[in-house]
Each structure stands twice: as structure tokens, then as C-alpha cells.
Amino acid sequence: MQVRIQGRREHYRTVAFDADRNAVLLIDQRVLPHEFKIVAVSDYERTASAISDMTVRGAGAIGATAAYGLAQGVRAFDGAEAAEFESHVASVYETLKNARPTAVDPVNAMNIVRSRMADGASINEKKTLALQAAEEFADEDVAHCRAIGEHGAELIKDGARVLTHCNAGWLAFVDFGTATAPMYVAQERGRAFHVFCDETRPRCQGAALTAWELSEQGISHEVIADNAAGYLMQRGEIDLVIVGADRLIAATGEVANKIGTYTKAVLAARHGIPFYVAIPLSTIDRELSSGSDIRIEERAGDEVLGAWGIDETGRRRYVRIAAPESGARNPGFDITPPELISGIITPHGIWDVNG
Ligand code: MRU
């Protein structure tokens, strides 16, 4: 996506790789929209930490980061023993896999890298193949998002008012995004529309990231409190909902996405508003047989009990909202059943999960 930096527009990927430094390059999403900063992460353990602490977040972006992180870890191996190499690869894989549990994209991405490495006859060949596979995964993520945009744009009619939740935009992928991709293509096709961004407490990815992306892109939008969507739907002010996903269970059509997605799907059904989920193929889980088997990330309570922001001096600060003696429960994701989903926007077209 293009970003305005000191008056100039420049193109950036959310995740990239510097082969000379063996470093994963990440846009630091913790400081956006107040500061635009790229960090170079120098080893796979730090890459896993960047996923856990949400320097990088969003299913596709952490998928590409894990793929690069695996290649990074593999390339750092300096032994000559095949068995030692295989155990190193397994430990890099597990470290990155355990960084965050709910999105399936990191696992799918690393499985692709590993299976490509199997074609290498020597350790050196495997190292080369690992990086090639990670680069291809990142490029495919971009191509998938673009194709999602082409298929989904038809849903956004001139004058539409679209609700989205959290950030399934450019920053949640390598480029372009999923839920936002139809918006970008609709804009290219000359359509005028308005987007409501759920603020998405507790980490406010909607207010901080999606709204910033849309403003960089010149798309009309407003941030709404998480609790405002029902009121707007009741008044006929929302025509369409498009969200992303962290995991789609192929066997059932259930979707795991940022906490609050299920609530919006129930509200949309109540008001007869189409509710779409946009995903690349890396978000499909072909292993689990039920949404209740998905491990839902439970995050620290202080995210709910307070909020992060920038003070008047530009310093990033945490302010406490709740009483000091209150605790919190903080599940990061919820599961939306297929009967609440009008369709899944994929790179191959819009799928009906209830057919
Ligand atoms: O916790 P996050 O920010 O990594 O959560 C991911 C999300 O932003 C959402 O769940 C999003 O809608 C899907 S990620 C493409």
C-alpha cells in the first residue's frame, strides 16, 4: 500500500525480508497511526516475539512473518549434521507456531516452507528453498488479496455504507488486505461509499489501523464505538458487513475472527444485512472438525482494564480506566457459525458456506 511519508507517497509491504542481513522487516503496528516505523528483526526467536507482542498482527501478516521466520532460523544453522539440522528446524517451527494460537495462517505458511525444503538434497539447498518458499508465500498472499478485491467489489454498490470490524486490511496481510480489498477495488472502479470502522476494543485495531489505512487511501470513513453498530443497523444506516478471519473450519464453515465479530453477525442477521467474510486460502483449516476445537487466545487483562495511546508530547502511554482492584477476562477471538454468514469472499470467488 502507498503511505504518505513527509509529503511523498511510498509503497510498503507489511512484512518483507532482507536476505543480506537475514532479518525480517516489519512495520511496527504498535505505534501506528502516530508513527510509521520499520523494524528489522534479527533472529527467529525475536521474530516469534514480534508476533506475540503484536509488533506484527493479522492472520496473513503473521503467516508471512512465520514463513520468513522459519527461513531465517533455517539459514542461521551453522552445522553440517542432517539430524541436528532437522531437530533445529523442528524447534524453530514450534517456537513460531506457539507465538499466537488462533490464526491458522502461520501453520499453513510454515508447512508450505517445510514441504518445499524436503526437495533439497543438502542443507544449503534446503536453506535456499526455504527462503524461496517464504517469498512465494508472501507474493501469493498479495495476489490472493487482490483477487478477493476483484470478486468482492461487486458487493459494494454506489452509495453503500459498509461496516468492518478490527483490521483485516493491508496491515493484516502482506499488502492490500482482505476485508478492505473489495473497498479498494470499488474505489478504483469509481464507486462512492462510506465505511464504518468498529473501534475494536480492547486493542483498537479498527480505530488505530483500519481508519488510518482508509484515510491514507482517501476512502470516506468514520470510527464507531463497538456498541454503536446495532443502533446504526436499526436506523438503516448500514447496508453491508465485510470482515476478515483468522481461521475458517473447512468441515463446518465456522469462522474464528476478532472478538465482537459474532455479535455483529447476529445483529446483521436480525436486521437482514448481508454479512461477508473475506479470506485467502491460507486461512482455511482442513484439520479440525469443529469450531469449538479452535484455541482461542486469552490475552492479558490490562488490555481491557486500560488503553494505550499517545500523549500531547508524542509519547506512547498506557492509562488505567478500571479501578485498581478490578480484574478482567480478555478472549481475543470468537466463532461465527455459517448460518450467519452470507458468503465467503475468496481469491476464487464468493463461496456459499450454507449450500
Ligand atoms: O489480534 P489481531 O489483531 O492479530 O487479530 C486479527 C484481526 O485483526 C482480525 O481478527 C481480523 O479481522 C482478521 S486477520 C486477517
Image (cartoon, grey):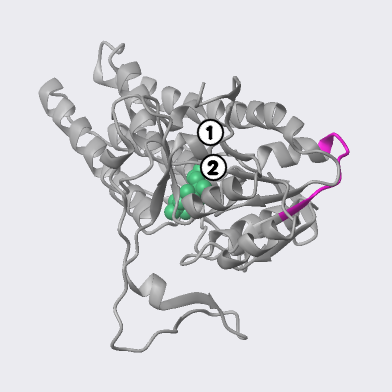
151 to the left or right of 251: right
CA separation, marks 2 and 1?
Answer: 6 Å
Residue 203 vs residue 315, the one in the foreground: 203
Query: In the rendered structure, which disc, 2 or 1, sits on the residue that comes first in sequence?
Result: 2
Q: Amino acid at mark 2?
A: Gly
**Quarter of the figure that contains the N terminus:** top right
- Quadrant of res 300: bottom left
> Which of the numbered marks, if any, corresponds to residue 279?
1
Q: Position of residue 152 (x, y in %)?
A: 68, 32
Q: Is residue 276 magenta?
A: no
Contact between marks 2 and 1 (CB within 8 A): the answer is yes
The structure residue drawn at horizontal position 26% and vertical position 10%, both measured from the top left corner, is 121
The structure residue drawn at horizontal position 53% and vertical position 62%, both measured from the top left corner, is 200
Label 1 neighbour load within 10 Å: few <14, some 14-19, many 20+: many
Q: SS for tag 2?
A: loop
Decide: is 332 above or below 344: below
Task: Find disc 2 in the rendering and name its residue.
Answer: 244
Does any atom of ligand 1 lie closer than 8 Å to the CB of label 2?
yes
Q: Which residues are magenta?
A: 188-195
Q: Position of residue 36 (x, y in %)?
A: 61, 60
5 to the left or right of 106: right
> Which of the numbered marks, if any, corresponds to residue 290?
none
Q: SS for tag 1?
A: loop
Q: Tell me the chief SS of the magenta region.
A: loop
Q: Is residue 191 magenta?
A: yes
Q: Position of residue 341 (x, y in %)?
A: 54, 37
The answer to whether residue 26 is seen in the rendering is no
Label 2 neighbour load within 10 Å: few <14, some 14-19, many 20+: many
Does any atom of ligand 1 lie closer than 8 Å to the CB of label 1?
yes
